[in-house]
């Protein structure tokens, strides 16, 4: 849910016409991956250290809670050039929005498939869709999603 709304918001604010962004399956996949990198639905998750270890100049003891900042990793300038900007050409491949390795989200392929199928339909059906007011993110601990997404679909009312 959050990934879908976050993507719509990012696309509408990007200035790139959605018709161009979703013109081919390859461009659609690239934009979905890039919006997941740019504005992921989960900014952080926590894990417990299973043993004592050192990382990045910090010491951790078994049982310590470790906060992993997925959104921060997705904005790493060493991995993504101009990481603070949405760039459909980049394609966002390698983002950590759904975790990685053993902790990769089992629902990620379905979430991505839903977006790849639904977003081109949405923007084809409503090519003049526009934001009608600034978006506000909901105040949630782990999840990063909009409180609301107010849009004008650009539909002319004949009645």
Image: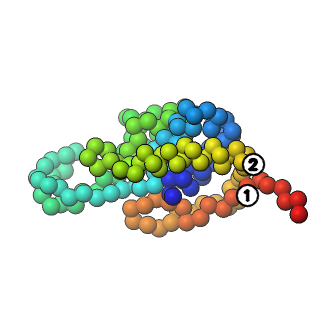
Q: Residues within 10 Å of mark 2 (few under 14, many from 20)?
A: some
Mark 2 to mark 1 CA distance (whole Å): 8 Å
Kindly indicate the quadrant of the structure image that contains residue 78. Answer: top left
> Where is mark 2, residue-wise?
128
Give the residue drawn at x 59%, y 64%: 148
Whether label 2 touches label 1, CB < 8 Å: yes
Task: Label 2: state its secondary structure.
Answer: loop
Give the residue drawn at x 66%, y 49%: 122
> Where is mark 1, residue-wise?
152
Above or below, 47 relative to 115: below
Q: How is the image coloured?
A: rainbow
Furthest-right residue in view? 159
x and y percentages locating residue 110 in the rendered image = 45, 48
Quadrant containing the C terminus in the rendered view: bottom right
Above or below, 96 relative to 81: below
Q: Earlier in the sequence, mark 2 or mark 1?
A: 2
Give the residue drawn at x 13%, y 49%: 53
Looking at the image, which is closer to me, 12 or 122? Answer: 122
Give the residue drawn at x 72%, y 49%: 126
């Amino acid at each position: 849910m959050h990934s879908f709304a976050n993507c719509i918001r990012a696309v509408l604010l990007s200035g790139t016409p959605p018709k161009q962004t979703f013109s081919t399956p390859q461009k659609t996949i690239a934009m979905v991956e890039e919006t997941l990198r740019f504005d992921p639905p989960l900014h952080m998750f926590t894990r417990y250290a299973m043993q004592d270890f050192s990382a990045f100049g910090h010491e951790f003891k078994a049982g310590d809670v470790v906060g992993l900042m997925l959104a921060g990793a997705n904005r790493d300038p060493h991995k993504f050039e101009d990481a603070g900007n949405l760039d459909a050409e980049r394609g966002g491949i390698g983002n950590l929005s759904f975790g990685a390795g053993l902790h990769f989200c089992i629902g990620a392929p379905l979430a991505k498939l839903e977006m790849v199928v639904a977003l081109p339909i949405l923007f084809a059906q409503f090519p003049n869709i526009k934001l009608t007011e600034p978006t506000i993110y909901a105040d949630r601990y782990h999840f990063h999603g909009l409180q609301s997404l107010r849009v004008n679909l650009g539909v002319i009312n004949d009645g």
